[in-house]
Image: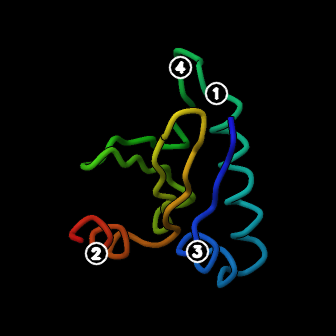
Amino acid sequence: MRIVALPGFQRGFDRLPRHLQEKTRHQLHTFLGHIGSPTKPKSLRLKKLPFENFEISINMDLRILFQLQGDAIILTLLGDHEDVRRYLRR
């Protein structure tokens, strides 16, 4: 699987303090390790959202929004609940 980080995701990632960047990497690694598995770790809190979007949690406030396109995971946004709501309203 290929991972493509769009500018909105990269901007959000670059703004995070180092410890949250590490937590983000860890959650992405956990998610990638369970693709194709019938079970997913509950810590990811994976959710299907409207318009073919999915979200996984980094912590109680921070989310990764992504889409699956063919053999690629498109990381579209890294932000809080309000950032996700704004993105989905477009």
The percent position of residue 76, horizontal first and vertical second, equals: 50, 62
Q: What residue do we see at 67% from left, 36% from top?
A: 32
Callout 4–callout 2 Cβ contact below 8 Å: no
Tell me the number on the disc at residue 34: 1
* Sequence-wise first label, 2 or 3: 3
Q: What residue do we see at 73% from left, 43% from top?
A: 29
In the picture of the structure, the residue carrying the numbered disc 4 is: 39
Between circles 1 and 3, the one closer to the viewer is 3
* Sequence-wise first label, 1 or 3: 3
Instruction: Tell me how far mark 4 sits from mark 3, CA to CA.
Output: 30 Å
Q: Residues within 10 Å of mark 2 (few under 14, many from 20)?
A: few
In the picture of the structure, the residue carrying the numbered disc 3 is: 7
Q: Nearer the viewer, residue 87 or 26?
A: 87
In the picture of the structure, the residue carrying the numbered disc 2 is: 86
> Which secondary structure lies at badge 3?
helix
* Sequence-wise first label, 4 or 3: 3
Q: Kindly identify the amino acid type of the residue bearing the numbered disc 4.
A: Thr
Instruction: Tell me how far mark 1 sits from mark 3, CA to CA.
Output: 25 Å
Q: Is residue 76 above or below residue 68?
A: below
Q: Residues within 10 Å of mark 4 (few under 14, many from 20)?
A: few
Instruction: Tell me how far mark 4 sits from mark 1, CA to CA.
Output: 7 Å
Q: Kindly identify the amino acid type of the residue bearing the numbered disc 2.
A: Arg
Q: Residues within 10 Å of mark 1 (few under 14, many from 20)?
A: few
Between circles 2 and 3, the one closer to the viewer is 3
Which quadrant holds the C terminus? bottom left
